């Protein structure tokens, strides 16, 4: 057996042991001590699929009072570092993964729109949501739990649990509710500054609070097998290969990288070099180039950004079982 195969089996064995251990203790009666306000009588998923990721409730602290500076004045970041770029009614803000890797959720408001900017490192899933639902504004935090290796968030108003990858309530009073995703770009800092010269960038209140700019998941996106996941894997693509997901449909990043541009009807996907992986080297700024993706719908000569996510193939396969990924 070659070393790669041994590593795959070892990773799978460890993940299987961890998942089996938590599946045996996936008991709402036990969770209720930490979550007394969560209605565990309402859920849309098997509780055995929800496991601990290690930290407790809010052990990974969300950012609830974000601080920004002019992007042009931020010189600590490399231009190639990844940010989640969000533009609403002309107001532009960048949320660096060097910060979100350590906090995972930013509760913010842009141009009067309350937003949750989220990033799950284990899935490389970067999604922005409108925090308004059913006439109320929700604030989000981290449960410390995972489902299919993806972050499970909670809202502080009802303490319902939400699947980050889908923006869907899965446990509690908000079960079945869906947050509205907002078009955002996972892009290099340089690209953000180019398209939004007057934009602002999130900075830490205390730069010594965490090892901002360091990657605690060193080498993760080069491993053959995901962490804390023991589900079925896609058969025709490596589980840790990046894929671009748009409206439940997925294209492989390697395919887009080779082609440069892919069009399907009004939908146009483009790839351009110049963005570091946040999950590769110890310093994010040194990560290998995984490139930038822009996804737009072109109608009547006008191009408009659409919601998309750059995630791993195993994640797409877990949440959209049976759907094929475009490989050629």
Image (spheres, rainbow, N blue to C red):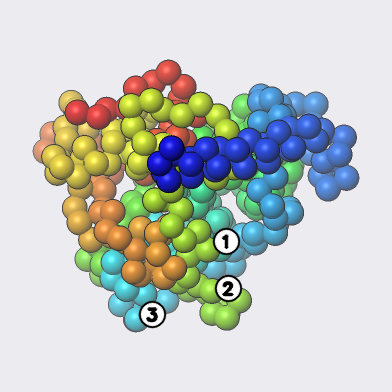
* Of pointers 3 and 2, the one earlier in the residue sequence: 3
Residue 314 vs 103, above or below: the answer is: above
The reply to whether residue 160 is visible in this rendering is: yes
Dot 1 and dot 2 residues touching (CB under 8 Å): yes
Quarter of the image containing the N terminus?
top left
Q: Position of residue 43 (x, y in %)?
A: 71, 26
Q: Position of residue 209 (x, y in %)?
A: 60, 76
Residue 112 vs 27, above or below: the answer is: below
Question: Which numbered dot is residue 113?
Answer: none
Find the distance from the CA under tag 3 to the CA under tag 2.
Answer: 15 Å
* Picture residue at 20% right of the left edge, 56% below the top: 273
Question: Which numbered dot is residue 103?
Answer: 1
Dot 1 and dot 3 residues touching (CB under 8 Å): no
* Of pointers 1 and 3, the one earlier in the residue sequence: 3
* Picture residue at 19% right of the left edge, 45% below the top: 257
Q: Secondary structure at mark 3?
A: loop
Q: Secondary structure at mark 2?
A: loop
Question: Which numbered dot is residue 210?
Answer: 2
Query: Which residue ends up furthest to the top in the rendered image?
Result: 322
Mark 3 nearby-residue class (10 Å; few <14, some 14–19, many ≥20):
few
Query: Which residue ends up furthest to the front in the rendered image?
Result: 1
Between label 1 and label 2, give the one nearer the viewer. Answer: 2
Query: Which residue is disc 3 drawn over?
Result: 76
Q: Is residue 143 left or right of residue 245?
A: right
* Of pointers 1 and 2, the one earlier in the residue sequence: 1
Q: Position of residue 201 (x, y in %)?
A: 40, 69
Identify which residue, 30 or 58, lies in the foreground.
30
* Picture residue at 39% right of the left edge, 51% below the top: 222
Q: Secondary structure at mark 1?
A: helix
The reply to whether residue 87 is visible in this rendering is: no
């Amino acid at each position: 057996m070659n070393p790669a195969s041994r590593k795959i089996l070892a990773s799978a064995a460890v993940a299987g042991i961890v998942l089996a251990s938590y599946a045996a203790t996936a008991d709402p009666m036990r969770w209720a001590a930490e979550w007394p306000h969560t209605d565990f009588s309402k859920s849309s998923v098997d509780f055995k699929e929800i496991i601990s990721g290690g930290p407790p409730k809010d052990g990974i602290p969300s950012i609830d009072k974000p601080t920004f500076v002019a992007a042009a004045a931020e010189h600590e970041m490399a231009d190639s570092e990844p940010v989640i770029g969000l533009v609403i009614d002309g107001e532009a803000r960048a949320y660096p993964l060097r910060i979100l890797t350590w906090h995972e959720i930013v509760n913010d408001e842009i141009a009067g729109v309350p937003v949750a900017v989220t990033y799950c490192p284990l899935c490389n899933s970067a999604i922005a949501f409108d925090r308004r639902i059913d006439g109320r504004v929700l604030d989000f935090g981290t449960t410390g739990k995972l489902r299919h290796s993806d972050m499970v968030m909670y809202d502080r108003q009802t303490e319902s649990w939400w699947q980050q990858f889908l923006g869907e309530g899965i446990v509690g009073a908000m079960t079945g509710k869906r947050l509205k995703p907002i078009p955002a770009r996972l892009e290099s800092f340089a690209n953000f500054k180019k398209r939004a010269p007057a934009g602002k960038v999130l900075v830490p209140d205390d730069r010594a609070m965490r090892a901002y700019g360091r990657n605690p998941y060193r080498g993760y996106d080069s491993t053959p097998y995901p962490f804390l996941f023991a589900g079925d894997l896609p058969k025709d693509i490596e589980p840790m290969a990046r894929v671009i997901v748009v409206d439940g449909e997925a294209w492989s990043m390697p395919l887009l990288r080779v082609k440069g541009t892919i069009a399907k009807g009004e939908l146009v996907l483009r790839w351009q070099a110049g963005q570091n992986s946040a999950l590769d080297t110890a310093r994010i700024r040194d990560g290998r180039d995984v490139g930038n993706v822009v996804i737009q719908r072109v109608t009547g000569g006008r191009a408009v950004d659409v919601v998309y996510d750059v995630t791993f193939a195993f994640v797409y396969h877990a949440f959209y079982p049976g759907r094929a990924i475009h490989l050629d």
